[in-house]
Image (cartoon, grey):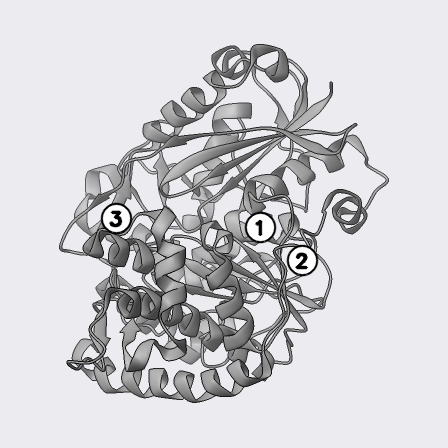
């Protein structure tokens, strides 16, 4: 057996996919849970050594013979987290994550230094939002100046795993787009944005080399190989952010499809052959990890919303589907605004979740559960509409993430977005995308599009079409949702 490995460093767990390159089947999937520290300030942090412990734990659960079959490896990772390392590659501080909303003040300071919101978009393609890495760097300088003085390299979560595997510091343009420091048009660091983060220091000296798409990072170090039980010396692909690897894992490497990820966060993104810049800043102007661009919208509360509602009502996953199906479309007027951890789109980092439209008739568990699904989906429909306004049409939506396992949720996405929904047999989109990128190292003459076509299989039993009556109903329901968002936004501005 010959396999490639995809690693996905998520927020809640680290996952592995072993993919058999001869049989073109997934040979094994393993995972290990991760802790997450959050507090009332909006901080959301992990320790980098938790990631290494989870990596070793996940590999230890894979059959040694299967581990020995690995020919190449690649890493996908949660975007935006700031891993500060010193000259000895020791981590200087807890890693502030994508869902950390405690740097709102630093965002405002950076944008003011850069010349304002419009100037940030002019310089880099994006405004500075609390999720992005840039504000976390400034926060470290203000709150932990001694650690900041020792800062020798700025890394992202997947870069840190690459460092562990190979001993090399590097980045690629897709994940680097989420720092707020990259000029996404030219795929290079923006000097004005670096000065805006810290006018007293040349931060370019702390930024690693930008590798081109799927340029190998290096070979697997003997020490790391011994700890995780796979062959030393196998090539390590550059990897990318979880959204970029999710695009590969769902075949979104050429124009036409839109990927919607229903995970802890919700994301909507599409491949583009030229930069897509949103002057309003709602759509993140990111690069892809396959030579193009990946305009993207991210919400911070997707399965977060459904899990909180399930826990509140004591409904396990086995009953969730039947409960959602019992409620009618529109949940009898119950509307959930899924802003439980603050929100990035709309940019309301201090927002909190709301349930509106309640009366004595509709306060039923099934309405609350369906409303949570509908609210999380409405938040993502905003991204579908914004992409369309920028010329990126959703002719088909490819679903991935944990929420895609729900038949009710898949149909709600199709109806709300008025689009066919496709699901692939390969479930772990980001980890599988990393495995496909690793596979490309073994087939240097093949394009990533060719590799995706040869290895992705539609699950026709899970694909669905929108219903015409449902499309009309949800047009009206979405309008009511937007009115509710507008009404409460002033409370958290």
Label 2 vs label 3, nearer the camera? 2
Local packing at callout 3 (Cα closer than 10 Å; few below 14, some 14-19, many 20+) is many
| Mark before the other along the chain sequence, 3 or 1 | 3
Where residue 358 appears, as percent x and y from the top left, is 19, 80
**Distance CA(mark 2)–CA(mark 3):** 30 Å
For the C terminus, the image quarter is: bottom left
Is residue 231 toward the left or the right of residue 100 in the image? Answer: right
Q: CA distance from mark 1 to mark 2?
A: 8 Å
First reached walking from the N terminus: tag 2 or tag 3: 3
Picture coordinates of residue 185 (x, y %)? 61, 66
Is the residue under label 2 in contact with that under label 1 (CB below 8 Å)? yes
Q: Pointers 3 and 1 in contact (CB under 8 A)?
A: no
Q: Which residue is mark 3?
A: 44
Residues at marks 2 and 3 touching, judged by CB atoms closer than 8 Å: no
Mark 2, secondary structure of its residue = loop
**Of callouts 1 and 2, the N-terminal one:** 1
Closer to the camera: disc 3 or disc 1? 1
Label 3 and label 1: CA atoms lie apart by 23 Å
């Amino acid at each position: 057996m010959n396999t490639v490995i995809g690693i996905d460093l998520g927020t809640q767990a680290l996952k592995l996919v072993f993919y058999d390159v001869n049989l073109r089947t997934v040979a094994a999937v393993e995972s290990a849970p991760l802790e997450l520290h959050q507090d009332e300030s909006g901080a959301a942090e992990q320790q980098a050594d938790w990631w290494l412990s989870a990596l070793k734990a996940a590999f230890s659960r894979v059959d040694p013979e299967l581990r020995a079959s690995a020919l190449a490896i690649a890493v996908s990772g949660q975007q935006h987290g700031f891993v500060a390392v010193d000259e000895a590659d020791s981590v200087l501080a807890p890693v502030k994550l994508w869902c950390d909303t405690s740097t709102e003040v630093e965002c405002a300071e950076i944008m003011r230094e850069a010349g304002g919101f419009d100037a940030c978009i002019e310089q880099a393609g994006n405004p500075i939002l609390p999720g992005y890495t840039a504000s976390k760097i400034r926060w470290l300088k203000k709150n932990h100046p001694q650690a900041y003085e020792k800062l020798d390299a700025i890394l992202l979560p997947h870069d840190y795993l690459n460092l562990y595997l190979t001993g090399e510091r590097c980045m690629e343009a897709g994940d680097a787009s989420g720092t707020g420091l990259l000029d996404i048009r030219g795929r290079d660091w923006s000097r004005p944005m670096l000065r805006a983060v810290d006018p007293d220091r040349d931060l370019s000296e702390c930024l690693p080399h930008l590798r081109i798409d799927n340029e190998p990072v290096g070979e697997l170090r003997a020490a790391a190989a011994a700890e995780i039980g796979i062959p030393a010396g196998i090539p390590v692909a550059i990897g990318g952010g979880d959204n970029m690897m999710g695009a590969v894992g769902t075949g979104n490497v050429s124009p036409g499809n839109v990927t919607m990820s229903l995970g802890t966060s919700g994301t909507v993104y599409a491949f583009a052959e030229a930069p897509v810049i949103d002057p309003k800043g709602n759509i993140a102007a990111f690069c892809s990890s396959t030579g193009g661009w990946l305009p993207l919208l991210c919400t911070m509360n997707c399965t977060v919303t459904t899990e909180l509602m399930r826990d509140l009502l004591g409904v396990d996953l086995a009953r969730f589907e039947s409960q959602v199906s019992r409620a009618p479309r529109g949940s009898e007027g119950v509307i959930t605004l899924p802003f439980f951890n603050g929100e990035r789109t709309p940019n309301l980092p201090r927002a909190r979740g709301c349930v509106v439209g309640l009366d004595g008739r509709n306060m039923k568990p099934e309405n609350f559960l369906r409303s949570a699904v509908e609210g999380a989906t409405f938040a993502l429909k905003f991204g579908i509409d914004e992409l369309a306004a920028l010329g990126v049409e959703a002719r088909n939506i490819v679903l991935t993430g944990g929420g895609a396992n729900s038949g009710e949720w898949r149909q709600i996405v199709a109806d709300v977005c008025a689009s066919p929904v496709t699901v692939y047999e390969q479930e772990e989109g980001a980890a599988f995308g990393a495995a496909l990128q690793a596979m490309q190292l073994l087939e240097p003459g093949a394009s990533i599009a060719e590799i995706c076509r040869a290895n992705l299989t539609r699950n026709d039993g899970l694909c669905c079409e929108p219903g015409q009556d449902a499309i009309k109903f949800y047009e009206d329901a979405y309008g009511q949702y937007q009115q509710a968002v507008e009404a409460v936004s002033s409370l958290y501005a």
